[in-house]
């Protein structure tokens, strides 16, 4: 009571006037695209709050995946994705005080990936850039360990899933706004300021507006993949929640995500989603009525035809662009295959493809985007991993994804399992990533999608453990006299 009265008296007597005025002046003096004052005002209190709450920090990190805010600190770009690294501080403190460290069931292949990232830094020709890329991928992979150590109940699992779902809702809403104004908008530049350093040599470059929404993400290709991964997760939330308000919200989010996916005008993402849906349908063909399948296919084909007809001029241009993309990507894939042939076991190391592309001096690359060549990629995750990590990395990474999908399909077939829909959503999300990897590599290396995909892999472990625990408890109850 005394403290409340004192604080009210302090505020009423003007004791807080000076710090409030200073904060307001700091915000007013800051440039719109330099969110450092916002980081100071919001980040410091959050640091105190999360310092002893690792699970809450994980939920916040999951929400922030598409909003990779960047600010400059002593000339170094600091991105919000570093939350994946900072979370290990409170996590280690909690583990040392309460329980031992839980090892991922993919522990051995993930350790190999970490070793390959270390090897990449040793052989790097541009160490700052490779170090940044290694930290990005390594911290994403480490989310598998974070998830299994912090999520031990169904409630916590759904908190993380809902964090991803709400973030996707915001991304979808902004994509519609972005398409309406036909511009990137101030919020895009706040999230993605144009900063070029040795860590990010080409971050100051950006493509012109092309009537295709990237939303808050780096480009429309990554936005399309992000929408693809979120649609099954939000669909699982829709099927899992019981209250009417929750169902309405998640159903609306699924619709908005579909619209956002369409507005990326990215055929690779569209194809990945369609193939993943067909894959899931084939796996469950014995449980799906033929009539419902046909009706769904007719609706999708009709909706797609209407969308194409309404944007015929743009779609005609995109078809011509696809032919050019096929030609240029074949050059990239040939180059990646050549690097794999030269280093078949461990690859050339992460970040080695860009310098090779620059040295090859492709005429079309020098003509359309010479500045991108030193940090470019082959736009195919399979070829990229073969060239950077060799057959060892290829088996470890895609073997992990394939096993995670298989385990989720097995749980999804158990009609009585309370994690059934979540398992199917996670499995469908990873299946989309596997298909999308044929036409893009932001699935595993992008600043946003890579975090989401590896977090989903971690969530598959959580679902497998929780599901096994529920089944074990049920068997014990049935065995009791």
Image (cartoon, helix red, strand yellow):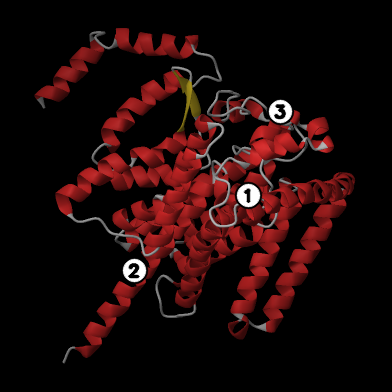
Which corner quadrant of the image does residue 446 belong to?
top right
**Which tag, 3 or 1, sits closer to the chain's start?**
3
Mark 2 and mark 3: Cα distance apart in space: 47 Å
Q: Give the total of numbered labels.
A: 3
Q: Is residue 85 visible?
A: yes
Location of the N terminus by quadrant is: top left
Residues at badges 2 and 3 in contact (C-beta under 8 Å)? no
Location of the C terminus by quadrant is: bottom left
Residue for badge 2: 465
Residue for badge 1: 441
Q: Residue at x 86, y 50 (%)?
A: 323
Assess disc 2: are there few (<14), some (14-19) or many (≥20) residues with their C-alpha within 10 Å of its C-alpha.
Answer: some
**Which tag, 2 or 1, sits closer to the chain's start?**
1
Tell me where residue 104 appears, x and y as whole percent.
35, 60
User: Which labelled disc corresponds to residue 335?
Assistant: none
Q: Is residue 43 above or below residue 436?
A: above
Residues at badges 2 and 1 in contact (C-beta under 8 Å)? no
Q: Is residue 34 above or below residue 70?
A: above
Q: Residue at x 54, y 14 (%)?
A: 31
**Which tag, 2 or 3, sits closer to the chain's start?**
3
Give the mark toward the camera: 2 or 1: 1
Q: Nearer the viewer, residue 443 or 271?
A: 443
Q: Nearer the viewer, residue 127 or 378?
A: 127
User: Which labelled disc corresponds to residue 371?
Assistant: 3
Tell me where residue 236 appears, x and y as whole percent.
50, 63
Q: Going by the picture, which residue comes out furthest to the left?
A: 2
Mark 2 and mark 1: Cα distance apart in space: 30 Å
Tell me where residue 391 appears, x and y as whole percent.
56, 60
């Amino acid at each position: 009571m005394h403290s409340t009265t004192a604080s009210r008296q302090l505020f009423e007597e003007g004791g807080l006037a000076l710090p409030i005025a200073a904060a307001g002046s700091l915000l007013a003096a800051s440039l719109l695209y330099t969110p450092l004052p916002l980081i100071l005002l919001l980040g410091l209190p959050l640091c105190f709050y999360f310092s002893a709450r690792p699970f809450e920090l994980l939920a916040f990190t999951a929400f922030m995946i598409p909003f990779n805010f960047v600010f400059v600190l002593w000339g170094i770009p600091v991105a919000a994705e570093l939350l994946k690294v900072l979370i290990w501080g409170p996590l280690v403190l909690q583990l040392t005080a309460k329980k031992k460290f839980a090892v991922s069931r993919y522990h051995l292949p993930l350790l190999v990936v970490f070793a390959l990232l270390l090897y990449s830094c040793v052989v790097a020709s541009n160490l700052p850039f490779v170090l940044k890329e290694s930290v990005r991928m390594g911290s994403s992979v480490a989310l598998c360990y974070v998830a299994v150590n912090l999520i031990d109940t169904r409630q916590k699992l759904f908190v993380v899933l809902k964090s991803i779902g709400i973030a996707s809702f915001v991304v979808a809403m902004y994509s519609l706004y972005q398409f309406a104004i036909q511009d990137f908008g101030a919020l895009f530049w706040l999230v993605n300021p144009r900063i070029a350093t040795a860590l990010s040599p080409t971050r100051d470059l950006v493509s012109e507006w092309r009537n295709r929404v990237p939303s808050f993400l780096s480009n429309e290709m990554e936005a399309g993949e992000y929408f693809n991964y979120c649609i099954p997760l939000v669909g699982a939330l829709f099927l899992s929640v019981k209250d009417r308000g929750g169902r309405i919200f998640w159903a609306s989010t699924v619709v908005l995500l579909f619209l956002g996916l369409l507005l990326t005008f990215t055929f690779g993402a569209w194809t990945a989603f369609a193939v993943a849906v067909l894959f899931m349908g084939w796996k469950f063909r014995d449980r799906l009525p033929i009539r419902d399948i046909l009706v769904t296919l007719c609706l999708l084909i009709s909706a797609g035809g209407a969308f194409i007809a309404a944007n015929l001029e743009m779609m005609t241009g995109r078809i011509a662009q696809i032919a050019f993309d096929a030609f240029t990507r074949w050059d990239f894939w040939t180059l990646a295959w050549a690097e794999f042939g030269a280093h078949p076991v461990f690859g050339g190391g992460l970040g080695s493809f860009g310098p090779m592309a620059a040295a090859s001096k492709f005429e079309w690359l020098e003509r359309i985007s010479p500045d991108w060549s030193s940090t470019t990629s082959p736009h195919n995750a399979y070829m990229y991993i073969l060239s950077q990590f060799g057959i060892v990395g290829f088996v470890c990474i895609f073997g992990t994804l394939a096993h995670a999908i298989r385990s989720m399909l097995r749980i999804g077939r158990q009609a009585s399992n309370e994690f059934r829909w979540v398992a199917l959503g996670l499995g469908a999300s990873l299946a989309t990533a596997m298909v999308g990897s044929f036409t893009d590599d932001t699935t595993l290396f992008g600043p946003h999608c890579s975090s989401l995909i590896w977090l989903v892999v971690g969530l598959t472990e959580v679902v497998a453990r929780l599901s096994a625990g529920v089944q074990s408890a049920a068997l014990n109850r049935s065995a009791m006299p």
